[in-house]
Amino acid sequence: MLFLDKVSKKYADNTSALDGISLLIKPKEFISVVGPSGAGKTTLLKMILAEENPTSGTVTFENINIHKLKRADMNEYRRRIGTVFQDFRLLPDKTAYENVAFAMEAAGRTEEEIHADVPHVLELVDLGNKMHNFPHQLSGGEKQRVAIARAIVNQPDVIIADEPTGNLDPKTTYEIIQILKKVNDLGTTVLLTTHNTGVVEHIGRRVISMKDGNIIMDSLEGKYVV
Amino acid sequence: MIWTKIKRTLRSGFVSFWRNGSVSLASVLVMIVTLLVISSIIFIGAMLTSTLKSIESKVDINVYVAQNSSDEDIAALQKSIKNLPEVSTVTFTSREDALTQFRQRHQDDQLTLQALDEIGTNPLGASFNIRAKDPSQYETIVKFLDTQKTSVDGTGTGIIERVNYSNNKQAIDALNRIMTSSRKLGTIVVTFFALVSILITFNTIRLAIYIFREEISVMRLVGASEMYIRGPFVTVGLMYGVVSGLITLILLYPMTYYVGPLTFNLGTGLNVFTYYVSNFGQMLLVVIGTGLVLGAVSSYLAVKKYLKA
């Protein structure tokens, strides 16, 4: 589904964030990307989200080079990828409901669909009773659950989660991972980066270990080795 | 679908305007100052025009006709003056009218009246009073009158005895200079102040949107189209325009009311309050229109910066 072919990324100061990485992501996989800070995990996600262009190599999604997409097609592509970040990145002046609804509005859904789907998705992440709270009225775990609800509401093909549990305590981390597993069970590919050994072992699925911009290990039932 | 989009954009803009109250308040205040500056520029312009008009209306040329000229010659001269494109009005004062006016002017001056009676005949000549459309055109009119003079003199039946322009020439020239320079100076000052206040408003709105730069990047990641991200910001910009425009129009009412008599006594011949009330429709269009354009364009351009990704 997603294929990275010898992708390299060099920044202006000639530091190399990715060094010719090749990676194939199949549908319905749950992949954890692990490695120390500066290993290139976030750059890898940025390549997939087309937030940055690679210095060389290509990223293809269903055989289309995503870095060559036109503006309108790019928006279309991004709607097929849900994103979750360590710092949540919710819209602060919108309620939980409105944050989720915004993603649907952006995708051009009708009011009826929004009224039906948003409460359902918020219920799924167990936030049914805090739908009309603003982000500053929610705890870290609750914010992350809103972010996940926003990421999954358009039924994307892939969920990309960059350190989603980085700011959360162990119990909340466990809950968030459970939600992501549930999403994966429903058929969505999940790509997750993390520092957390416990998380990786708890998931028990494919693990990609990175160091200095290279993949040093790719194991189907991996453990945190770096 | 297009209606849904417009509805969502408007609703989102309205909500954002209220929820970010302090940012909105700051932007609206700055925009009110700008709109007040622009309004006072309009008032100053009107006062300048009115002053110049009242001075201009005092400038004219008098042409004195020789006493022995025939009615036909006078009629012919009046017609040819009237046909000049530069001439606005020509009024003819006959010998009899001139005498009546003279007696009226000197009704308390017995000595003069006695002297007049002693002459027995009417010593006054008929005259034309000419007003040009523009003060700078008097020169042309006088040149024309001079050609009439010489040609008529040549045949010995000269009917133009005297043109009192040369006496006024210096005053008229000075006035011309003052008017041209004050118009130029006015335009420069007005453009400068308008530009400065527009730039300040533009910057304020840019800063207001700078606060939302993170959100704009989140919206992009969620896959929102450019227009969908931009729409609510432009709506908020338009709301700044409407709200500050309305407040400005309300503020102008007491302000001009107090200043009005002062501006009139200044010798401009214009009461700003009367001007404001009688030109309210025009002021409304200019003030609200400027607010709308300023708000929308500033927002549009400010968001553009953060859309590049």
Image (cartoon, coloured by chain):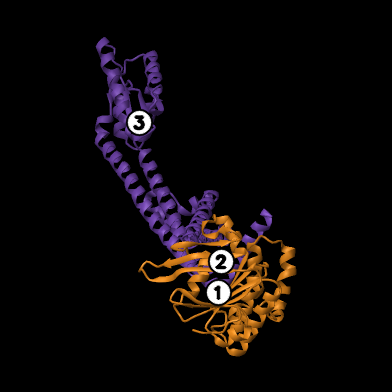
Chain colours: A orange, B purple
Residue B99 on image: x %, y %: 36, 27
* Left or right of residue A72, residue B47 in this image: left
The three-letter code of the residue at mark 3 reads Phe
Residue shown at the point (72%, 78%) measured from the top left: A123
* Label 3 – label 2 distance at C-alpha: 90 Å
* Label 2 – label 1 distance at C-alpha: 10 Å
* Label 3 – label 1 distance at C-alpha: 91 Å
Q: Which residue is mark 2?
A: B221
Q: Are marks 2 and 1 in contact (CB under 8 Å)?
A: yes
Instruction: Chain letter for mark 2, please.
Output: B
Q: Which residue is mark 1?
A: A89
Instruction: Chain letter for mark 1, please.
Output: A
Q: Secondary structure at mark 2?
A: helix
* Frontmost residue, B39 versus B21: B21
The three-letter code of the residue at mark 2 reads Leu
- The lab-note entry on whether marks 3 and 1 share a chain reads no
- The lab-note entry on whether marks 3 and 2 share a chain reads yes
Residue A72: assigned label: none
Nearest to N terminus: mark 3 or mark 2? 3
Count neighbours of disc 2 (C-alpha within 10 A) and say few if under 14, some if 14 to 19, many if 20 or more: many
3 vs 2, front mark: 2
Residue B201 on image: x %, y %: 44, 61
Q: Secondary structure at mark 1?
A: loop
Q: Does the image show residue B25?
A: no
Residue B102: assigned label: 3
Residue shown at the point (40%, 70%) measured from the top left: A16
Q: Are marks 3 and 1 in contact (CB under 8 Å)?
A: no
Q: Residue A13 sits in which quadrant?
A: bottom left
